[in-house]
Image: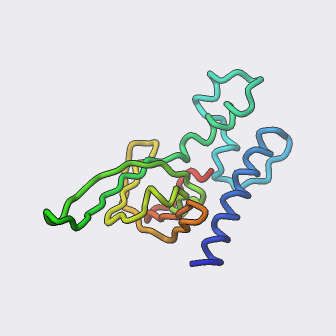
């Protein structure tokens, strides 16, 4: 998990930096074709042009997901099931999502809800409690990567 997970985290940070760079330099358009930062978002029309951070946030909004978590714990009263909710960001169009470690820690079931209203089961790829990061994956293609 170590070096491969870290390379995924580095890729995610690099992608976020690239999105910020594109927001500041409109003539620089070298991101992947499916990057939502290249396409004007519907919400971006309502955001003032002099608010670049809000413009970027509106454009990457479709990349933000809700992560529904199921946890089963053994207690003195028997197995107890609990549910939780967290958020994540799609960082690869083939289904890789970055979230926080505490969202997936101890999870027995992961389900992702997308901005378009669809859902998909997810699997844990890796997590790092020290950096509080985790990567999960859904079996989908063509997702709006940040």
Residue closest to the far left: 77
Task: Please say if 146 is above or below 110.
Answer: above
Task: Please say if 3 is above or below 94.
Answer: below
- Tell whether 82 sits left or right of 53: left
Q: Report the residue at 46% width, 42% height from top.
A: 115
Q: How is the image coloured?
A: rainbow
- In the rendered image, residue 145, in percent from the top left (x then y), is placed at 60, 53
Task: Please say if 138 is above or below 52.
Answer: below
Q: Nearer the viewer, residue 74 or 91?
A: 74
- In the rendered image, residue 123, in percent from the top left (x then y), is placed at 41, 67
- In the rendered image, residue 49, in percent from the top left (x then y), is placed at 75, 24
Q: Report the residue at 29% width, 52% height from top.
A: 83
- In the rendered image, residue 88, in percent from the top left (x then y), is placed at 51, 51
Q: Report the residue at 63% width, 38% height from top.
A: 59
Q: Report the residue at 75% width, 44% height from top.
A: 20
Residue 42: image quadrant is top right
Q: Nearer the viewer, residue 98 or 78?
A: 78
């Amino acid at each position: 998990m170590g070096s491969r997970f870290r390379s995924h985290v580095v890729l995610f940070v690099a992608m976020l930096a690239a999105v910020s760079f594109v927001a500041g330099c409109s003539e620089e358009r070298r991101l992947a074709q499916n990057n939502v930062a290249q396409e004007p978002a519907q919400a971006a029309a309502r955001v003032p042009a002099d608010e670049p951070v809000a413009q970027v946030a509106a454009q990457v909004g479709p990349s933000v997901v809700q992560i529904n978590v199921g946890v089963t714990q053994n207690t003195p009263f028997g197995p107890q099931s609990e549910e939780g909710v967290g958020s994540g960001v799609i960082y690869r169009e083939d289904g890789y999502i970055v979230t926080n470690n505490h969202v997936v820690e101890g999870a027995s079931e992961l389900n992702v809800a997308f901005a378009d209203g669809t859902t998909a089961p997810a699997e844990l790829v890796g997590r790092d409690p020290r950096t509080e990061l985790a990567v999960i994956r859904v079996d989908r293609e063509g997702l709006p990567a940040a």
